[in-house]
Image (cartoon, helix red, strand yellow):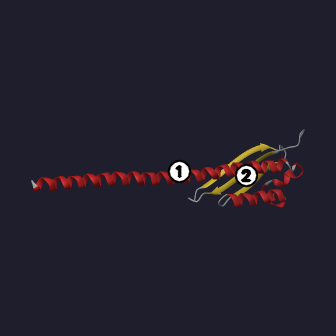
């Protein structure tokens, strides 16, 4: 009779250990999921910031049509509003850079915002529009 009780006690201990193992795997799965969600949220925020900053650059060009040709390429730093924008890109995004390419003949502008995520991946957001005075 004594042997039967000790066997039942051993089986109960195994059941408890299996239940703990299943619980721990569930907790580890939730921790992994939380990490993935945090990473995805961070990347999403960077993409939204890049889109906003590119739109802001276009808005700055529209509000400064008399100097819009100065926004092109490396000359952008010579325009105070464009330099402020580039500084804002650098401050907002990790290793962020902003560049504007302008076709003076057609008025087509391309704004490129690049950044490197904490994981080391380089990302780029590019948008294009036409910035020209009416009738040109």
Q: Which residue is mark 1?
A: 37
Within 10 Å of disc 1 (Cα), the crowding (few <14, some 14-19, many 20+) is few
- The percent position of residue 27, horizontal first and vertical second, equals 41, 53
Q: CA distance from mark 1 to mark 2?
A: 24 Å
From the viewer's perspective, is 108 left or right of 123? right
First in sequence, mark 1 or 2: give its number: 1
Residue at left offset 82%, top offset 54%: 71
Quadrant of the drawing holding the C terminus: top right
Residue at left offset 50%, top offset 52%: 34
From the viewer's perspective, is 25 left or right of 45? left
Within 10 Å of disc 2 (Cα), the crowding (few <14, some 14-19, many 20+) is many
63 above or below 87?
above
* Total numbered labels placed on residues in the image: 2
Q: Secondary structure at mark 1?
A: helix
Q: Which residue is mark 2?
A: 53
Whether residue 13 appears in this view of the structure is yes
Q: Secondary structure at mark 2?
A: helix
Observer-nearest residue: 95 or 7? 7
Quadrant of res 119: bottom right
Observer-nearest residue: 78 or 16? 16
From the viewer's perspective, is 32 left or right of 66? left
Which label belongs to residue 105? none
Kindly indicate whether the residue at mark 2 contacts the one at mark 1 (C-beta within 8 angstroms): no
- The percent position of residue 84, horizontal first and vertical second, equals 79, 59
- The percent position of residue 56, horizontal first and vertical second, equals 77, 50
- The percent position of residue 121, horizontal first and vertical second, equals 58, 56
Observer-nearest residue: 22 or 108? 22
Residue at left offset 82%, top offset 51%: 60
Residue at left offset 19%, top offset 55%: 9
**Depth-wise, is mark 1 or mark 2 nearer the camera?**
1
From the viewer's perspective, is 69 left or right of 47? right
């Amino acid at each position: 009779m004594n042997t039967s009780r000790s066997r039942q006690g051993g089986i109960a201990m195994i059941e408890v250990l299996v239940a703990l193992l299943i619980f721990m795997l569930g907790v580890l799965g939730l921790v992994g999921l939380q990490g993935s969600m945090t990473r995805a949220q961070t990347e999403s925020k960077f993409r939204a910031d890049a889109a906003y900053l590119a739109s802001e650059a276009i808005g700055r060009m529209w509000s400064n049509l008399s100097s819009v040709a100065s926004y092109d390429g490396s000359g952008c730093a010579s325009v105070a509003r464009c330099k402020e924008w580039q500084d804002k890109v650098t401050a907002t995004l990790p290793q962020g850079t902003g560049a504007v390419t302008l076709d003076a003949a057609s008025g087509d502008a391309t704004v490129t915002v690049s950044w490197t995520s904490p994981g080391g991946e380089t990302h780029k957001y590019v948008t294009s529009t036409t910035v020209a005075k009416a009738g040109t």
